[in-house]
Structures are given as C-alpha cells and as structure tokens.
Image (spheres, helix red, strand yellow):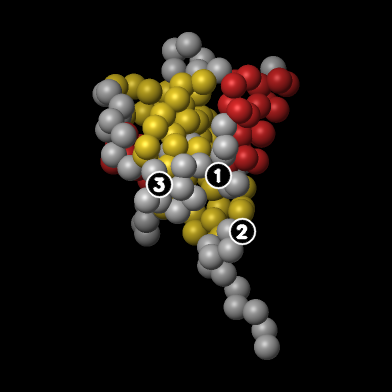
Amino acid sequence: MKERQQKVIDVTCALIIDNKNRIFAAQRSSQMNLPLKWEFPGGKVEPNETSEECLIREIKEELGIEIEIEKSLTAHTHHYPSVTIRLIPFVCKHISGNITLKEHANLKWLNANELLDLDWADADIPILNHYLNDLNAI
C-alpha cells in the first residue's frame, strides 16, 4: 500500500528586528501545538494571499503591531508527524504599535548571541541558523 503524500502548508514567519538590532522571539502558549516552544511569529498563508500579505496580517492579528518587510530569507520545509510545512521567513522591522500577546505566552527581544539559548520549535531552527550564518558572513 502506497503512503499518502502529506499536503505542504505554506506558513510565514517574521524575524522582527528592533532599533537596537535585537530579534523578537515569541513563546507558544501551553494551549498551542508545540506548547511553550519559541518561534518567530507568523501564520498560514490563506488562498489568494501572497506570503508578504499573510505575514503583515498575521503579525497585526497576533501582536497588534505594524511591520515592514525588509527582505526574504530561504524557505525551509519541515515534516512534523501530523503536518508538513514550508516555513517562509522574512526579516522585518517594527513600524508602529505596542506589542500585545494575543496567542503567545511570552516574548523576548534578544541579541543574536542569545537566540540559541531558547527551546525553539523544530521548524524554526534552520531559519534561525540560516539567519545567524548570514550575520556572521557580513
């Protein structure tokens, strides 16, 4: 019997950088899948929506802030037991609004050298490593 192919879900994420070059990390709530893991916030791309539109919408919904996308990073496909996602990362800056956690348990603004200290969701780890490698190449 042939194994059923899992559908790949496109999911965006934001590496939000502040004016002190710190990176925003959000901790998933205990009610979410992957409880209390850290992640770059974002969400599922809806039909007829670009990745960029999705990210701006999701950050507004989840955090209550406006962001500006500065550049895209390489997407990464990750296979969880129940779902396969293609995580599409963007480096962003915070434009306006005060952060309000609507879904997450906690947040941190961290320097690049502090990021690896967190317990990240598996799909975010390659994105984080790619970002840190790019920083070291500069």
Q: Does residue 86 appear to the left or right of 16 in the view shown?
A: right
Q: What x and y, as percent, mark residue 136?
A: 71, 20
* Residue 52 screen position, x and y as percent: 42, 41
Camera-side mark, 1 or 3: 3
Residue 79 disc label: 2
Residue most extreme to the top: 20
* Mark 1 and mark 3: Cα distance apart in space: 13 Å
Locate the C terminus by quadrant: top right
Quadrant where the N terminus sits is: bottom right
Q: Amino acid at mark 2?
A: His
Q: Tell me what residue is drawn at x 49 percent, y 59 percent.
A: 9
Give the Cα distance between marks 3 and 2.
21 Å
Looking at the image, residue 21 sits to the left or right of residue 29; the answer is: right
Q: Which mark is residue 121?
A: 1
Residue at image mark 3:
30
Instruction: State the separation of the CA atoms marked 2 and 1.
Output: 12 Å
Which label sits in the foreground, 2 or 1? Answer: 1
Badge 3 marks a residue whose secondary structure is: loop
Residue in the foreground of this view, choosing between 119 and 42: 119
